[in-house]
Image: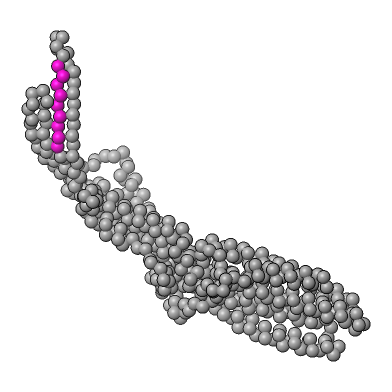
Amino acid sequence: MKFGLFFRAFLALIISAILLFPARAETLREALTSAYTNNPQISAALLSVRASVEDIALRKAGLLPSINANADFSASWINRGGTITTPATGSLGISYSQILFDNLKTNAQIEQARAYSEVAKQALRSATQNVLLSAASSYMDVVRETSLVQLRADNVSFYQAQLRSTKERLAVGTGTKTAVSQAKARLAQAVASYKSAINNLKSAQANYQRWVGHKPKNLRLAYDFADLLPNTLDDAQNLANRLHPAILTAKAQLRAAQSGSDAAKAAFGPTLRLIGNIGSSTDFVSGVTTPSASVKISLSVPIYQGGAMGASVRKANINQIKSEIDVLSAQNQVRAAVVSAWSGLQSAISQIEAANSAVYSSEQVLEGIIEEQKIGQRTMLDILNARADLTKAKESKIIAQSNKYVAAFSLIAATGRLSASDLGLPVKIPSADGNVAKVEDIWQDLRSLSE
């Protein structure tokens, strides 16, 4: 009896400490919003996008004029027959240099930079999908483990009641010591299972905090995302081929490889450059200032570079072939992921239906055995076994329901639609479009200097 009182007090303390969260429930939509807003992986991926955009400006600068202001001052000491003179001169001028033609090499490099910028954008989409999927999975983990803790707590209470009942029967001579021992054994197993569920819940809560950014607060499933789920497997495959970031990344990398091959081939062509200078030089001793100006066109044609240019072309061609293969590989991987997620969702739905049937049947069986035990047609062991079957069926139902949500989000991710905009999250979605517009502005540097 003392053990029962102690355990009930311990049980109440644990439940109040772990399961009784603040009154306001946190929905899955709110958790995903918090994950999207606070997760550093998304922030880091966005910074990578912005950095990649700057490569476009760096490449475009190759076709734009380079204008520099130059100023020089020099002084010397000269000893001529014992006479020391100190001539001093200075010059001030502006230099101009621009590539007029480089066989379209720089144009290919600009296109390559744009392709790599697209790669970074798709990496941001991929990071977003991973974060949102992990957040949704961690949410369902907490919901599942919380339900299992509650179920196993009820199980402990049931076995405690059965143990008290067998002891009372033994005291009045209608029970047996064997029945008491069986009830004690089942109670011990139930307590161990309950403590294991507590530990699993703590682990799930910690993982939830990692992805969402705060501890779970009375989680509640109230989120309709059925419109994002494809109706058929073919629909899912078609969506994935058009939208999945892994496929779009591979295609962007292929564009970059093609541009890299074009740039390597263009390096064999001529480079025509315009160079100009205007300025003046002053002799500070005589005070004479001499203005000057020059302009020239320089043509350079590579003849021999030690085999480096040929190696660059061969390497670029190999990278292009590899990128084409990578596209096929990405399509195959995504196709397999879609089939796996679709099958997982269908399996979870079937498991829920089976679990519902099993729970209903197990409840009926347990109720019947309890009534039969009262008139001596069943033993305590029959009740304990029936309760174990019911608990197993309920646990299967809880796990299947959790798996259904996770499989649904996995399917959405496999089709490439697990994004803040598609989910309708109330967040500000950052974009690199503004950065692209800035780097495409050829006078940005001059405006920056004047600001």
Give the percent coordinates (x, y) of residue 271: 20, 45
Question: In the displayed structure, does residue 403 sit left or right of residue 268?
Answer: right
Q: Nearer the viewer, residue 442 or 262?
A: 442
Q: Which quadrant would the N terminus be assigned to in this image?
A: bottom right
x and y percentages locating residue 23 in the rendered image = 56, 74
Q: In this view, does 392 lie to the left or right of 175?
A: left
Part of the protein shown in magenta: 85-93
Q: Residue at x 14, y 11 (%)?
A: 83
For the question of whether residue 337 can be seen, the reply is no
Q: Residue at x 16, y 19 (%)?
A: 86
Which residue in the rendered view is the most extreme toward the right? 173
Quadrant in the rendering for residue 210: bottom right
The quadrant holding residue 293 is top left
Main secondary-structure element of the magenta-colored stretch: strand
Is residue 156 visible in this depiction of the protein?
Answer: yes
Counting the numbered discs, the total is 0
Q: Where is residue 413 in the image (x, y as percent from the top left)?
A: 46, 69
State yes or no: residue 63 in magenta.
no
Q: Which residue is drawn at 25% across and 46% down?
A: 268
Residue at (54%, 74%) from the top-left corner?
25
The question of residue 86 being in magenta is answered with yes
- Picture coordinates of residue 145, whole percent (x, y): 63, 70
Q: In this view, does 266 lie above or below 300?
A: below
Which of these two is toward me, 62 or 182? 182
Q: For this rendering, which residue is in front, 332 or 425?
A: 425
Up-down relation of residue 368 to residue 281 (above or below) = below
Is 439 on the left-hand or right-hand side of 414? Answer: left
